[in-house]
Amino acid sequence: MHVIEIDFCDPAEAAQALRALPFLTFLDSAMADRKLGRYSFIAADPFARIVAGVAGADWAARLKSQLAAYRTASLPGLPPFQGGAAGLFSYELGRSLERLPQPAVNTLAFPDLSLGIYDVTVAFDVIQRRAFILSTGFPEIDEPARERRAIERGRWFEAKLRKASLASPAGPISLDGWTSNFTRASYERMVREVIERILSGDIFQANVAQRFEAPVPDGFDHFGFYRRLRMLNPAPFSAYLAHEDFTIASASPERFLKVEGDRVETRPIKGTRRRFADAVLDAFQALALTESRKDRAENVMIVDLLRNDLSKVCVPGSVQVPQLCGLETFASVHHLVSSVIGCLRDGQGAVDVLAAAFPGGSVTGAPKVRAMEIITEMEGHARGPYCGAIGYIGFDGTMDTNIVIRTAGFRGGSCVVQAGGGITTASDPASEYDETLDKARAIFDAFGAREFAK
């Protein structure tokens, strides 16, 4: 490993300097936090890619094989992603893990899997305000050749960061003309139908969403939009991806899975209230959320589901819940967040954890497979990136991924934004519809959209 310490800057400035490189993946702790949002990473120009329009059942084995070929120990005292796989695991990847119906509509057809295998990462410790270029030298295996490549690639990235113009001309970042696949009436009708399914004993909970779409004009500044989004709605698990034929701008507050050594953690969010500028109203919203029996029940059900998922790969008795329904506050909303941890069994690694728990229970429901069948039936459209995961799996076996929510996906001249919520017997259809707008509001504000921003 060749390490170059560079001057610290806003990670978004460095990402903009590297944005012309292929397969850019920017994992951005836009909301700095010592525990959840300490590190940001930029990876680009990978030496290999794993891209699947429709992933087969062998995707996990392929990914494990690719990572195992370059297995290496991490260097202590540096940010944790020191080269490896990074990118997108779309929601539709779950269809390779379970027998599920196909969605009626999938016009944008985002890939199920889009990962770069990166030999170089630009890593930021946003708490200590230090930055590094970490260059592995892969795919060279011969030690002298690997060392030479590591030095050359590290210097090449350093030169790119120094020479690139940080003041490139900006294009438009506003979008209007948004339409939804649901009206208020039809969304509320869907919520009532989910409640009927629960009362009939079919499921305990399902997370259903509405889908907003708008045309994207030529010259649209995708990264400029992302910078505005991260400014208006900073989040600890934000991300920007510019891959082969799609772009994603995400301001996710939710960790999906983290693996460090033999320890695994997931942090499901269930329970949301809109924030207000008035401090008294805002405090009332937070209190109402913590005292909501409906939201707590929703959260506890998903915690139970995730405990079951982690138990598939963890030492018996090691799965614990150190935080249950804790209040966490973000730029635009309050959330109830829980933490579930476990100790991995021998022979189990990051990819095994991902396959055992994907997609996240907080964005599907319980029981998971039946909830996913109902989601496909009622939503009609493929979710694509929404409710999948973005993150990294390192050559050393470390992993950190988000849940893809609060996200705009761009492909084929269109932009899609989705927002939903968990439905239980205590759900009020009108409130559930309003909650979807509360969750999407920061994105529409960033677009300057008139239809749904207010």
Image: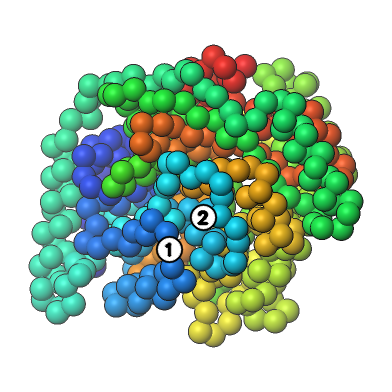
Secondary structure found at label 1 = loop
Residue 71 numbered mark, or none: none
Label 1 to label 2: alpha-carbon separation? 9 Å
Dot 1 or dot 2: first in sequence order is 1
Picture coordinates of residue 419, whole percent (x, y)? 61, 37
Can residue 246 be seen in the rendering of this structure?
A: yes
Residue most toward the top? 450
Nearest the eye: 176 or 160: 176
Q: Which residue is mark 1?
A: 55
Height in image: 422 above or below 414?
below
Picture coordinates of residue 5, whole percent (x, y)? 25, 52
Height in image: 306 above or below 447?
below
Picture coordinates of residue 273, whole percent (x, y)? 73, 32
Nearest the eye: 202 or 434: 202
Disc 1 and disc 2 in contact, CB within 8 angstroms: yes
Nearest the eye: 311 or 284: 311
The amino acid beneath tag 1 is Ala
Residue 92 numbered mark, or none: 2
